[in-house]
Image (cartoon, coloured by chain):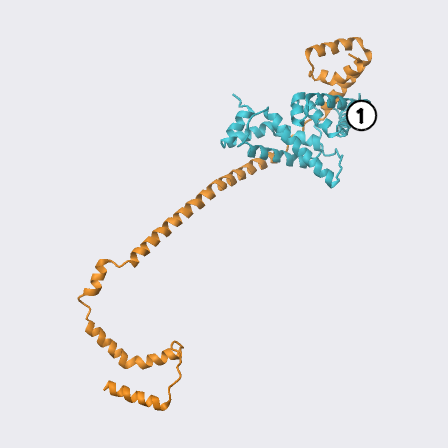
Amino acid sequence: MECKTIQEMLPAYHDRELKEAVFREIEEHLTLCESCRKVNVTLMETWHLLTVWEDCEPPQRIATMIVSGIAEQRKIRWVKIVLPVAAGLLIVIGLTFRFAGLQNEEHMQMPLPEQVHLSTEHPDVNEDELIADLHILEDEEFFDTVEELVKIDYLPLVEEPKQEETNKERSSLDVTLT
Amino acid sequence: MEETDIALMALIKKGDAKAFELLLARHQRSVYNLALRFLNDPDEAEDITQDAFMRIYKASQTYTPEAKFTTWLYTIVKNLCFNVLRSRRSAEIVSMDIEYMPELPAKGEDPVERISRSQIRETVIKAINSLPENMKIAVILSKYHGLQYDEIAAIMGCTANAVKLRMYRAKMILARELEGLK
């Protein structure tokens, strides 16, 4: 091998990064070649000089911050798992209750046979009394109620008929009432 | 018996917090020093150390041991360092300040020797910082982390021969820069 090639291989020679045969060849060359030996010594000394740049102790806070950061990450990871599950469960529970509620409403609206029976044949209800009460209401409050309804626009205002027609109607009404 | 890094990663995957703390204690120093030497900035080295370990934790769920754990770890750190360099370049911040590097006094060192050592140290740091980035990371990984060329090649994404060549060129530059100190 030429000196140039040998010198290019010297760093790998120092770092034991060569095949055994090449390593032996360089070793042999160095015993014979003065210039390559000089380069070799220079490289070795330079490499040794670098040891003056020693390691620094990392600040203690780094480990503390990393560990607390990881704890935070773990919490976030749990939330990411638990939150969708909880949300899903809530939706399922909500839907179940809603469905059950709808079914109950349907049951309430359906007339039960017993209730129908009670409403038609209840012994306490006296129809004659009810009709009599209605009559009282008609007699005493009917016109007042109509006036009230007109006031709040519940009944549409109808143009009043002419005086003569009104009188005729009243007389006919009186006849029918008597 | 001491758990291997890969075994610890498997435990972390199962949610073992102690395994993560053990892994952190084992590699924190080397991660911090790699970033510190490469970037020359203790704050950035701190950020990168935190970022690297957070990434390791997140990746523990999908981690499959295809190579040595340290190769994977240093690849993460190297990528983070190169990202910082890119953002520095875009911000056009160039800092070669070496005042931040706290020097550790050697035991039984006299003041004269210490000054001399401090000067040598500054010169060495300047010389390493003057290397191109790819050479610099190769030198740091080889010299200060004891990595083999094939591991460095895996981290840098190149061949072992490329690393061999870079190491040769880097050592020649350093020899020229540090000639006066020998």
Q: Is residue B108 visible?
A: no
Residue drawn at x 67%, y 24% as measured from the top left: B153
Q: Which chain gets the cyan colouring? A: B
Identify the residue under disc 1: B177
Where is residue B88 drawn, in percent x and y?
72, 38
B97 lies left or right of A66: right
In the depicted view, which residue is nearer to us: B178 or A171? A171
Q: Quadrant of residue B169?
A: top right
To which chain does the residue with label 1 belong?
B
Horizontal and vertical percent position of residue A175: 25, 88
What colour do you see for chain A?
orange
Q: Nearer the viewer, residue A7 or B128?
A: A7
Q: Is residue A93 above or below residue A62?
A: below
Residue B149: horizontal and vertical position, in percent? 68, 21
In this view, A102 is above or below A10: below
Tell me which residue sits at (34%, 88%) in the image. Answer: A166
